[in-house]
Amino acid sequence: MTVPAAPHQHAGDRRAAPTALAVDLGSCTTGVWAAERGTVSGSAGDVYPAAGAPVRRGRVTDVAGCAALLSGLLGRYPEPVPPGGVVVACRPVLASRSEQDATRRVLELVFRPSRVLFIDSVRAAAIGSGATAGLLLIADVGAELTEVALLDHGRVLAARRTEIGTGDLTLGATVDLISDNVVRHVDDLRATLDAPRLRAATARGLLLVGDGALHPGLGAAVAGALGMRVHRATTPRTAALNGAGLAAMSLRRHPAIV
């Protein structure tokens, strides 16, 4: 497969501050955020059909196809995005080194970045939702993955992950099955907490993000099974990308700190 060339940098851009970029490679929808440019998103089917499905269950399975998809998204910006930017990329929680390396290869092909930082999707979603203070239980239910984590001031203390999501509803899965996976993971995480932190985490409730947060009945099913308040992010589908964008801006301003 031929990968579309990355946009070229103009001579006037050479001394400009690097562009801050965020990427969320979803199994169904991929999103890119660029400072001063905003967000573009889409699936391989509507951006670059020849790419097929280059991300499956949160893993890049086709590097060239994924690069073609991202290049197609970048082409939607009115002005070219110069290379050399700082890129913050979402990764599924508990991602392996090889999975991360495949994503890095994609980012290097498309953005030719000056720096790449990976951030767990659950952490990015908490940042994008303005929910990093204190202890937080968060569930990110995507198209092909369900991730549940316990965060402490935005830092992942413990996490669980299952390869099931809303896309499986068309393959015979049910809302109850997805809910049961969320509940099982939350119960596992709660079992690791001491009493004071358990009370703090459960009193705050569960933050639900991702496509599943908008699916009818899932939030109520999880709340009923857990006996805990479940609330969804204001923009659940883009919470992780928004958080990664904030991290990218911090990385551009304070590269030695992030």
Image (cartoon, rainbow, N blue to C red):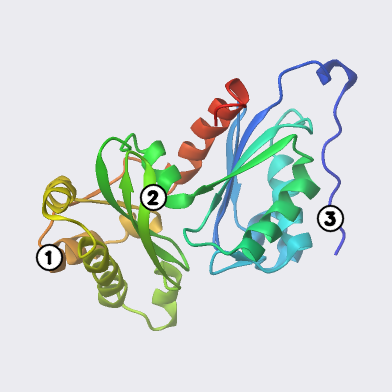
Q: Kindly identify which residue carries mark 3.
A: 3
Q: Quadrant of residue 185?
A: bottom left
Distance between mark 3 and mark 1 Cα atoms? 47 Å
- Residue 76: horizontal and vertical position, in percent? 69, 39
- Residue 235: horizontal and vertical position, in percent? 37, 42
Q: Residue at x 59, y 20 (%)?
A: 253
**The N terminus sits in image quarter:** bottom right
> Left or right: 120 with respect to 30?
left
Amino acid on which the number 3 mark rests in the picture:
Val
Q: Outermost residue, front direction?
A: 194
Amino acid on which the number 2 mark rests in the picture:
Val
Label 1 neighbour load within 10 Å: few <14, some 14-19, many 20+: some
Q: Quadrant of residue 167?
A: bottom left
Dot 1 falls on a residue whose secondary structure is: helix
Q: Kindly identify which residue carries mark 2.
A: 156
- Asked whether the residues under the numbered discs 1 and 2 touch, taking CB atoms below 8 Å apart as contact, a structural biologist would say no
Q: Kindly identify which residue carries mark 1.
A: 224
Q: Residue at x 74, y 28 (%)?
A: 79
Amino acid on which the number 1 mark rests in the picture:
Gly
